[in-house]
Image: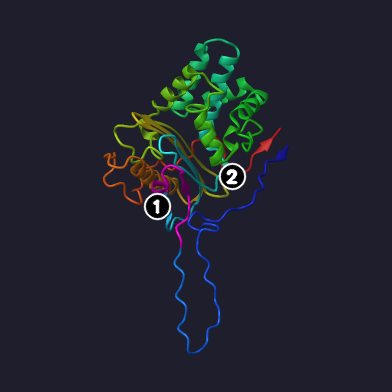
Amino acid sequence: MAAFTQTRKRRPLAHLVTGAAATLLAFAVPATAQAAPRAAASTPSYCASASNPQLAAQLSRDIASALSGRQDTVAFAVADAKTGVSCAYNPSLHVDSASVVKATIMGAVLRRGEDEHRYLTDWEVTNLQQMITASDNTAATNLWQSLGMPRLQAFLRLAGMNDTQLGTGGYWGLTQITAADELKMLNVFTSNPSVLTSAGKAYALKLMGQVEADQRWGTPFGAPATVSVHVKNGWLQRATHGWRVHSLGIFTGTGKDYRMAILTEDNATESYGIDTIQSIASVVHRDLNSGVSSHTSGALPHAPNVTAPEVSDGSAPFGPVTTH
């Protein structure tokens, strides 16, 4: 048996934004001259929009404030179809998927049914419901094995998720994902016309809208009551890089159609990762729903920690794993 290892280039912590801060140049001036003023640090340009540049700039500032002082590693991708605003940070950073890969498994199961021109079987329905609404691992393993690696890989290609690397040895929770690819995954259930029919999309959104209450933290934090929330989270502790805590969210409703993929690792606790995600999510909801009351009071720059059990989602073992 060979040891399973992952090698990748590390990224800076979330509050150190490459190329975003202004560089201060030290230079000599004549003794009689007044020293040049220090250059002000610029706000990271996380977000952009051709049609709403002011909104994008405001959201960039608010995300920067939300991330200020955070000590974990963060990657995110945000897209709003209505305003044209899109945001990204470390979008190509690979991290262990934990249980958010269950959304991908669901997409592949739905596509299989469409390829075979049939309805879902009772077995598929039962396992999909348990896997998404309760994050059941046995159900995820059942569906993962029934699909097989070739069909899963074909689904990734169809969805354009070319940077995603499927977990080997049956460890689906060690699938290597990126924020950019996870946003493409969410697009499969919303705007992408090439992967699922409208019925398949509606079924996926229905299950993500029925996730159990204790697993509805993360990207839904701060969403207005007028917005429909669809979520899938993952939380996994391993011997290296601490806790991986991730949250995928799709938000729909009258005049609303936006989605978020927020991935974190190097968290000391699960709660710390949740706090980071909710700090970002709260300002995204606030800015994209300007003038609409949110579920939270004031959508604070740093969301209060939620009560988390600090128990891994079970998608992969704590230490090294082996493949056969």
Extreme-top residue of the structure: 118
Q: Amino acid at mark 2?
A: Ser
Which residue is at 49% across, 21% downward?
A: 128
Looking at the magenta stretch, what is its main secondary structure? loop
Q: Does residue 59 lie above or below 229 as drawn?
A: below
Percent coordinates x, y for residue 257 in the rendering = 41, 32
Extreme-front residue of the structure: 51
- Magenta stretch bounds: 42-56
- For the residue pair 56 and 110, the one nearer the viewer reads as 56
C-alpha gap between disc 2 and disc 1 = 21 Å
Percent coordinates x, y for residue 288 in the rendering = 36, 41
Residue of label 2: 92
Does the magenta-highlighted stretch encompass residue 49? yes
Which residue is at 52% across, 16% downward?
A: 124
Residue of label 1: 66
Q: Is residue 82 visible?
A: yes
Q: Amino acid at mark 1?
A: Ala
Q: Is residue 262 visible?
A: no
Mark nearer the N terminus (2 vs 1)? 1
